[in-house]
Image: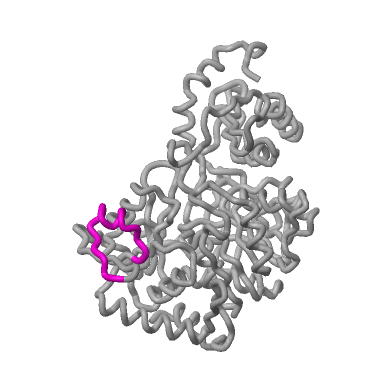
């Protein structure tokens, strides 16, 4: 067993009598976790498992199997429930999975698995692709184009990041963490499971339906607020859209629990206005930044070092610098490589994100590949403007386009219907008032459908598929190019 895993096991021994895992009325102490994991390691060895897909819903079983796989030396491949069936099949086949836990029967039948009893399914895969030596987990990133890519991580990388996060949040004295994101998401896996276990905090885990999340984009706010009230957590990990929902609910009188001490937010651009609204409510929000290729979090704001609007300072396990074009380069803990590709060399990893560093705090400006250049030669990072647009109550989704165009166009999905044009016009105007002219949404269009994975306009975790959107709205955008400004759409 590696030193990194030994350190986690030593923490479980230190906290042997403490309740470290809870689902509903049932609790598991550190010792109960160790005992259960030992039993499951023997089960995995008996089955001859090598590469295991973990396809369970959020729950104690997911965490116990995850820890057993870490201890057994098997390669753990979390299978996100928000992936499409085709994406899940790609994961099972490309990773050469021979054992699956929690697989849906229909998908099992399609991919050649046979039931072993309980929630286990087994098969002899047709191909077993080589993995990078030392791989303990393959986490698949949904990306914005093509099939998901497998990121190979060793145990040291995952647990080193978890240790940094535990140390960074220590002043908040977190005793109860509620898992909000799917556990198949690396961020929740590292920061919401390993870090609390190192700290001796109790992980409260519930099925996603109880959290209020369904699929990749459906969210039940009242269910979420009820769960927060019932569980009284000290810490949460939220995506920007979930933070927006929490802040909006609080502003409308649905107060979050006073037990909250550390709300980490990441996974996308967070509008400064949203952070200001959270501050006004007294919510302890700390923005961070990371990527799967670096085993999740790289920078984080903390109680002792916080700058609103930034992604925080570099955590102890990593270093960052900026390339000549502003791209964030990262060194330290990182992936072994992508599955099926050459190993990643030691040294600096190009993140694909643009940013700047002031007094040690990283501020991001969007994805390098998403930046467009207007007809007047101005560079625009659309995520910045889109994040401001969805701050407006009438707007649920927004896509900004302006490549080689004299005026930028926003395609908007209303949050509720009916939504009059006047309401959307006012919302866009409110955002434009705070933007430089070159970055404003000079025109807007009402989307003909929500941006979802089903119609190919978004990824399974909600990121915009910009190329697909440009193709879908090509004719409309082309018409705008030939329309005099005075006759343009709203």
Picture coordinates of residue 217 (x, y %)?
A: 53, 46
Does 243 appear above or below 165? Answer: above
Residue 104 part of the magenta segment: yes
In this image, 60 relative to 228: left or right? left
Magenta residues, as a range? 101-117
In this image, 325 relative to 339: left or right? right
Q: Quadrant of the N terminus?
A: bottom left
- Name the residue located 70 percent from the left edge and 72 percent from the top edge: 172
- Name the residue located 45 percent from the left edge and 83 percent from the top edge: 6
- Name the residue located 25 percent from the left edge and 75 percent from the top edge: 47
Count of marks overlaid on the render? 0
Report the front residue among 380 and 462: 462
Picture coordinates of residue 37 (x, y %)?
A: 41, 80
Residue 465 part of the magenta segment: no
Name the quadrant containing residue 259.
bottom right
- Name the residue located 37 percent from the left edge and 64 percent from the top edge: 102
Name the quadrant containing residue 36.
bottom left
Report the front residue among 345 and 18: 18
The answer to whether one can see residue 126 in this image is: yes
Report the front residue among 205 and 124: 205
Name the quadrant containing residue 130.
bottom left
Q: Quadrant of the C terminus?
A: top right
Name the residue at the front extreme.
25
């Amino acid at each position: 067993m590696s030193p990194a895993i030994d350190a986690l096991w030593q923490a479980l021994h230190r906290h042997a009598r403490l309740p470290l895992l809870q689902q509903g009325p049932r609790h598991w102490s550190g010792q109960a976790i160790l005992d259960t994991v030992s039993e499951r390691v023997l089960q995995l060895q008996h089955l001859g498992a090598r590469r295991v897909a973990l396809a369970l819903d959020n729950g104690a079983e997911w965490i116990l199997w995850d820890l057993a796989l870490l201890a057994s030396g098997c390669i753990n491949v979390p299978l996100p429930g928000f992936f499409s069936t085709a994406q899940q099949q790609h994961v099972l086949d490309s990773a050469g999975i021979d054992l699956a836990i929690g697989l849906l029967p229909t998908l099992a039948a399609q991919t050649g698995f046979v039931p072993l009893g309980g929630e286990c399914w087994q098969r002899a895969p047709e191909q077993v692709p080589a993995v990078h030596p030392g791989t303990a987990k393959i986490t698949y990133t949904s990306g914005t184009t093509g099939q998901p890519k497998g990121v190979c991580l060793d145990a040291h990388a995952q647990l080193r990041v978890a240790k940094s996060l535990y140390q960074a949040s220590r002043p908040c004295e977190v005793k109860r963490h509620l898992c909000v994101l799917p556990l198949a998401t690396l961020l929740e896996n590292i920061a919401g499971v390993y870090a609390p276990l190192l700290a001796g905090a109790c992980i409260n885990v519930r099925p996603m339906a109880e959290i209020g999340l369904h699929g990749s984009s459906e969210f039940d706010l009242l269910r979420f607020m009820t769960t927060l009230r019932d569980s009284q957590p000290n810490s949460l990990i939220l995506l920007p859209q979930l933070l927006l929902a929490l802040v909006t609910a609080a502003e409308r009188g649905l107060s979050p629990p006073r037990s909250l001490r550390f709300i980490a937010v990441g996974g996308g651009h967070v509008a400064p206005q949203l952070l200001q609204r959270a501050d006004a409510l007294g919510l302890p929000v700390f923005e961070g930044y990371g990527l799967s290729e670096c085993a999740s979090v790289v920078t984080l704001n903390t109680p002792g070092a916080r700058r609103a609007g930034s992604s925080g300072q570099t955590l102890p396990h990593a270093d960052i610098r900026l390339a000549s074009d502003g791209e964030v380069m990262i060194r330290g803990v990182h992936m072994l490589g992508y599955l099926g590709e050459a190993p990643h060399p030691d040294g600096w990893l190009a993140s694909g994100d643009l940013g700047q560093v002031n007094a040690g705090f990283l501020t991001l400006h969007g994805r390098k590949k998403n930046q467009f250049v207007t007809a007047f030669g101005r560079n625009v990072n659309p995520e910045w403007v889109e994040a401001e647009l969805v701050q407006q109550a009438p707007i649920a989704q927004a896509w900004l386009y302006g490549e080689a165009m004299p005026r930028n166009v926003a395609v908007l999905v209303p949050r509720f219907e009916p939504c009059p044009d006047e309401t959307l016009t006012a919302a866009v105007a409110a955002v434009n008032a705070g933007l430089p002219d070159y970055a404003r949404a000079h025109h807007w269009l009402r989307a003909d459908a929500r941006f979802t994975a089903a119609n190919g306009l978004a990824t399974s975790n909600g990121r915009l598929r910009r190329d697909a959107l440009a193709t879908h709205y090509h004719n409309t955008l082309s018409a705008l190019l030939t329309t005099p400004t005075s006759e343009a759409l709203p």
